[in-house]
Image (cartoon, rainbow, N blue to C red):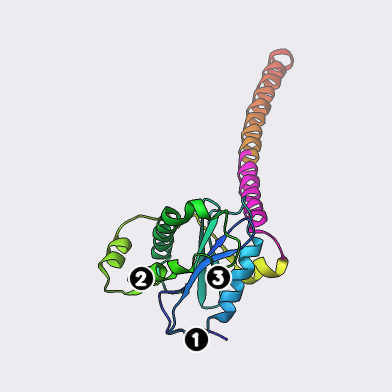
């Protein structure tokens, strides 16, 4: 099932414990009936997370974007339409995580069944509507303020993560390794160019000395 491209804004919110992927709370836009495929992808993603996973990440899934943020061992995830502001999505997650942790931090480790904090769904729903409503003063203010630096957040394809069976921490490590290799290559390339330039000067100097000796002893 594919969500209509007319869908906009924050459509699904899921909160889960990173250690074991246990869902703690959730809220779904009731106007949307075709979100189950993305909901299942999000639950599969929870099983791939680990304490070393990137703290913020965006995953592409067809016309949708899955954004998540990890705070204090809890993953706050939202599924949004592809046209919805990435900055706004992470501002939403930041506010969501602040309110949830403010109320439930001391109870998270003791949670023993799925959706133990489902009463928080009411607050999630209000935040979702607040951020989705384009006329909301909060949304307009958040768009205009640089509250979330989203330029450096890793972007992956959700199917790649799920089907390859790699944890996001592994993907993040590979990305960091590629960056380090690129920097090392640039450094070595610069050093080689510098060395080549030095040898050119040495060769010119030797040539000048030989020419001087030739003129000194053979011509003069």
Q: Which residue in the structure is indicated by mark 2?
A: 126
Q: Kindly state the secondary structure of the residue where label 2 is placed.
A: helix
The label nearer to you, 3 versus 1, is 1
Badge 1: residue crowd in 10 Å (few <14, some 14–19, many ≥20): few
The foreground one among 22 and 154 is 22
Specify the label residue 219 is tagged with: none
Residue name at image x 61 percent, y 61 percent: 112
Q: Kindly state the secondary structure of the residue where label 1 is placed.
A: loop
Residue at the limit of the structure toward the right, as seen here? 218
The foreground one among 133 and 102 is 102
Specify the label residue 33 is tagged with: 1
- Measured in 3D between alpha carbons, the distance from the residue under mark 1 to the one under mark 2, in whole angstroms, is 19 Å
Q: Kindly state the secondary structure of the residue where label 3 is placed.
A: strand
Is 130 within the magenta? no
Badge 2: residue crowd in 10 Å (few <14, some 14–19, many ≥20): few
Task: State whether residue 202 is above or below residue 126.
Answer: above
The label nearer to you, 3 versus 2, is 2
Q: Which residue in the structure is indicated by mark 3?
A: 60
Taken as a whole, is the magenta stretch helix, strand or loop? Answer: helix
Quadrant where the image shows the N terminus: bottom right
Precedes in sequence: disc 3 or disc 2: 3
The foreground one among 46 and 150 is 46
The label nearer to you, 1 versus 2, is 2
Horizontal and vertical percent position of residue 53 = 61, 54
The stretch in magenta equals 165-187
- Measured in 3D between alpha carbons, the distance from the residue under mark 3 to the one under mark 2, in whole angstroms, is 25 Å
* Contact check, label 3 and label 2, Cβ < 8 Å: no
Task: Work out whether residue 86 can be spotted.
Answer: yes
* Contact check, label 3 and label 1, Cβ < 8 Å: no
For residue 47, side relative to residue 130 (left or right) = right
Task: Work out whether residue 79 can be spotted.
Answer: no
């Amino acid at each position: 099932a594919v969500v209509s491209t007319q869908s906009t804004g924050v459509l699904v919110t899921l909160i889960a414990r990173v250690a074991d992927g246990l869902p703690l709370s959730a809220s779904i836009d009731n106007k949307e009936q075709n979100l189950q495929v993305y909901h299942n992808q999000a639950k599969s993603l929870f099983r791939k997370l680990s304490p070393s996973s990137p703290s913020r990440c965006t995953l592409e899934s067809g016309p949708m974007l899955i954004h998540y943020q990890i705070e204090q061992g809890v993953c706050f995830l939202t599924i949004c339409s592809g046209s919805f502001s990435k900055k706004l999505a992470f501002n939403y997650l930041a506010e969501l995580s602040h309110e949830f942790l403010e109320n439930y931090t001391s109870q998270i480790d003791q949670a023993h069944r799925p959706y133990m904090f489902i009463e928080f769904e009411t607050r999630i729903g209000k935040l979702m509507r607040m951020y989705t409503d384009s006329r909301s003063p909060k949304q307009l203010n958040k768009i205009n303020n640089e509250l979330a630096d989203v330029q450096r957040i890793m972007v992956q394809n959700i199917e790649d993560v799920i089907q390859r069976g790699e944890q996001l921490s592994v993907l993040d490590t590979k990305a960091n390794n590629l960056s380090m290799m690129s920097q090392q290559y640039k450094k070595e390339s610069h050093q080689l160019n510098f060395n080549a330039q030095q040898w050119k000067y040495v060769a010119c100097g030797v040539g000048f000395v030989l020419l001087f000796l030739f003129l000194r002893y053979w011509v003069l």
